[in-house]
Image: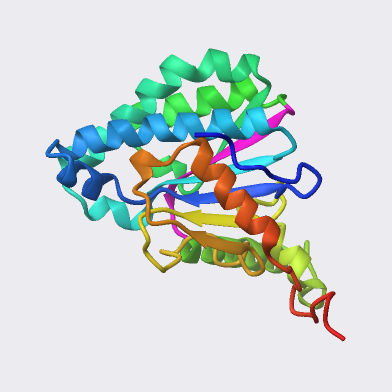
Amino acid sequence: MSDTPIDMNRLPRHIAIIMDGNGRWAREHGVSRAAGHEQGARSARAAIEACREIGGIEALTLYAFSTENWRRSDFEVNTLFRLLSKYIGIELQSVHEAGIRIRAMGRLDSLPKQAREDMRKAMELTAGNTEMTVNIALNYGSRTEIVDAARALAQDVRDGRLDPEAIDEAVFASRLYTADLPDPDLLIRTSGEMRLSNFMLWQLSYAELVVVPTYWPDFDKERLLAAIAEYQMRDRRFGGRSRSAT
């Protein structure tokens, strides 16, 4: 299959992906959910590599584990975090050599100890890299993020470091987990589900949404390029009128 043509001058700066469908992929292929997550981890690696190859994409955010995912079985949760540690161990050096910065957002202190330590190691090693940022959402929920931002602002006001009248959208955004990243231009959700699932509700205000029917384990570079091509066909108005409107 040939690569979908895209306009290199109109790339999204930041792509966010809700990686959905590992369990359904596993069921349809007659394998365990753990095998589905393993294949999903390979797709995550492929998405990172594809974005790096395309060039010009500043950030890729992957929704890996939500605050609601703790409701899954202990076995499945442990499998997910073992996979995280496994792939950090396998890929970290090559990711670092490619100039990719790894960061994470969410309440990381609540992660299992090994996963927490492995993520911090990855972030510390790659902190100075500038080619691209891979932002992994772990124990993440957007409502929790907004609450944490509001608490930080309230603390600053209480301590006299911030005038309440100075709080505007930019000040609020500076307290979010993604304060050092541009807002996503493109959100991709796999598996065909039509919902945001408590993901980056503030940051996605003006993102273009592309929902694909493909389960995440089958998502590949060609499908990523197709999503970017669809994004490039959109007329982004940011609440204003279309440039083509008369």
Q: Is residue 94 left or right of residue 58?
A: left
Q: Is residue 142 left or right of residue 6?
A: left
Query: What residue sits 37% from the left and 61% below the top?
Result: 192
Colouring scheme, one of rainbow, by chain, secondary structure, one colour:
rainbow
Q: Main secondary structure of the magenta part?
A: strand
Query: What residue sits 21% from the left and 51% below the top?
Result: 72
Q: Quick check: can you spot residue 38?
A: yes
Residue 134 lies within the magenta run = yes
From the top left corner, tell me how far across and down residue 193 is, in percent: 37, 64
Q: Is residue 98 above or below residue 27?
A: above
In the image, farthest residue toward the right: 246
Q: Is residue 231 above or below residue 134?
A: below
From the top left corner, tell me how far across and down residue 185 is, in percent: 67, 57
Start and end of the magenta stretch?
A: 130-141
Residue 125 lies within the magenta run = no
Along the line of sight, which residue is nearer the eye, 185 or 183?
185
